[in-house]
Image (cartoon, coloured by chain):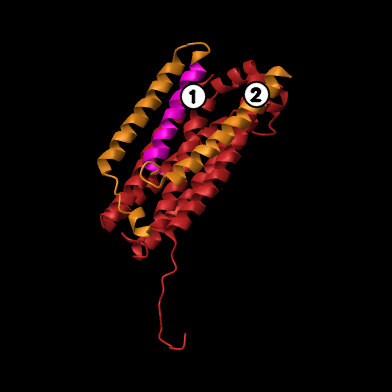
Chain colours: A orange, B red
């Protein structure tokens, strides 16, 4: 059973493509925040950061190739974090 | 169990090890998540002070450090493929590159922080005591969060260095590399946190 876990070998090429995508998004977010888009600046920067983190989690951290169980756990933790953020801000915005 | 035959059983649970690492990573995510919430709330309460304070940070240095961490994240991920291909030499080279990049990150951080400190911006400094509450909060969070992140870099370097030692001693091999995977996961976590720290502190002004 443990053996199946490790049979998948990710190609070097895949990692290079992911790195290129990550670097591209980094430079885009630097460029976008350089020009003033008002409230959209924060949204774009955080959106790009979220896409980057999903790429890191799926490919670099192997969630895409591992058992579903890991992905579900990670998603639950992020959901928990999102809930705490929403509840905190509901408190600050509407108190 | 009457026979006294020596039975060598390898006690290994790769999946258990990996699950444990992930659970540890979750605690780290929640730790930094809490700090991110503190940052967002204070930013919401002091928008102008945060805006002015964030302009003080060097975006170029931040971008260089982002690139360094992203590349190092790729090299450590590649080292896991290399060990699976039974290429010990390449594994060690890739891990070595990761360590060098981590060192470069810390050198950058040193210059960044010493620049700030020479401008009188450090916790408890006279300049900050005269600054507004918002600026005080911004730099407090800046030092706490990037400092905690830098501590993780140092721990990650020690962890990867230890695993490199195991690879040299052939204790980590193509069919037994759970600890290498776990050190990789830890390193990616460090990268993941920086992916959010960078826009929040350096980009959004």
Mark seen at residue A46: 1
Q: Chain of mark 1?
A: A
> Is B64 left or right of B126, judged from the image as shown?
left
Q: Is residue B89 left or right of residue A43?
A: left
Q: The C terminus of chain B is located in which quarter?
A: top right
Q: Residue at x 27, y 53 (%)?
A: B90
The spot of residue A77 in percent (x, y) is 54, 39
Question: Magenta part of the protein: which range?
Answer: A41-61
The chain that hosts pointer 2 is: A
Q: Residue at x 66, y 27 (%)?
A: A88
Residue under pointer 2: A89
> Real-space Cα distance between discs 1 and 2?
17 Å
Q: Residue at x 44, y 61 (%)?
A: B13
| Dot 1: element | helix
Residue A82 against residue B161 in the figure, above or below = above
Frontmost residue, B35 versus B148: B35
Task: Tell me if I can see residue B155 in this picture.
Answer: yes
Q: What secondary structure is the magenta-colored segment mainly? A: helix
Query: Is residue B205 shown above or below B141?
Result: above
């Amino acid at each position: 059973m443990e053996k199946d876990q490790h049979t998948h070998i990710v190609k070097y090429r895949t990692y290079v493509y992911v790195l290129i995508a990550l670097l591209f998004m980094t430079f885009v977010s630097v460029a976008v925040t350089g020009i003033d888009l008002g409230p959209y600046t924060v949204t774009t920067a955080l959106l790009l950061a979220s896409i980057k983190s999903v790429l890191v989690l799926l490919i670099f951290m192997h969630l895409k190739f591992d058992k579903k169980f890991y992905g579900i756990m990670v998603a639950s933790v992020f959901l928990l974090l999102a809930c705490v953020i929403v509840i905190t801000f509901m408190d600050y915005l509407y108190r | 169990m009457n026979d006294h035959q020596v039975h060598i059983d390898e006690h290994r649970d790769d999946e258990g090890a990996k699950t444990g690492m992930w659970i540890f990573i979750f605690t780290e995510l929640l730790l930094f998540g809490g700090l991110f919430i503190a940052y967002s709330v204070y930013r919401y309460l002091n928008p102008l002070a945060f805006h002015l304070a964030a302009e003080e940070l060097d975006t170029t240095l931040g971008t260089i450090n982002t690139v360094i961490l992203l590349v190092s994240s790729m090299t450590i991920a590649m080292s896991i493929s290399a060990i699976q291909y039974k290429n010990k030499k390449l594994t060690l080279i890739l891990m070595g590159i990761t360590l060098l990049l981590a060192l470069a990150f810390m050198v950058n951080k040193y210059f960044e922080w010493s620049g700030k400190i020479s401008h009188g911006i450090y916790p408890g400094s006279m300049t900050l005591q005269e600054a507004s509450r918002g600026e005080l909060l911004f730099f407090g969070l800046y030092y706490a969060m990037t400092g905690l992140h830098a501590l993780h870099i140092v721990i990650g370097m020690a962890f990867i260095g230890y695993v490199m030692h195991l690879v040299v001693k052939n204790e980590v091999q193509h069919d037994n590399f759970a600890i290498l995977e776990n050190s990789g996961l830890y390193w990616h976590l460090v990268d993941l946190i920086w992916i959010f720290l960078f826009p929040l502190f350096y980009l959004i002004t």
